[in-house]
Image (cartoon, helix red, strand yellow):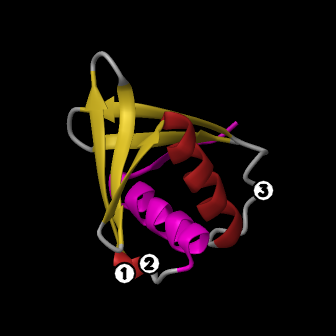
Amino acid sequence: MEEIIIPEQEIVNAICLFLSDRKDVSPENVEVELMYDDDYGFSAEAYVNGRKQILVESNIIEAVRYWLDTEMNVDPFAASLRLSLDDEQGIVIHYQS
């Protein structure tokens, strides 16, 4: 089993693509900030056409699965995805197929 690290910028890109598809807007109209809190875990704050939306960890994973399917042409459910906080890289996803 190979493990790949998906960097923070790719996670942000995945969320932008996912929300742009769901909201029927251009990805350039989506702004995303990833966050981590010791009490609440991973989340993202997204703005679509000026409206704020909070995504929890499961929403982030769903967005990355969408990105894997549509952009990377990989079976999004054939892999294990796990968010983690890296001191040097920030928020990353461990992708294990």
Q: What residue range appears in magenta?
A: 1-24
Q: Is residue 73 left or right of residue 3?
A: right
Residue shown at the point (35%, 22%) measured from the top left: 40
Label 3 sits on what residue type?
A: Asp
Q: Is residue 28 left or right of residue 35?
A: right
Give the image location of residue 44, x and y in percent.
36, 46
Count of numbered circles on the image: 3
Q: Which residue corresponds to mark 2?
A: 27
Q: Is residue 4 visible to the viewer in this orientation of the structure?
A: no
Counting residues from the N terminus, which is met first, the one under dot 1 or under dot 3? 1
Most foreground residue, 94 or 50: 50
Most foreground residue, 10 or 20: 20
Q: Residues within 10 Å of mark 1 (few under 14, many from 20)?
A: few
Note whether 94 is above or below 26 in the view shown: above
Give the image location of residue 88, x and y in percent.
21, 40
Q: Quadrant of residue 74?
A: bottom right
Q: Which residue corresponds to mark 3?
A: 75
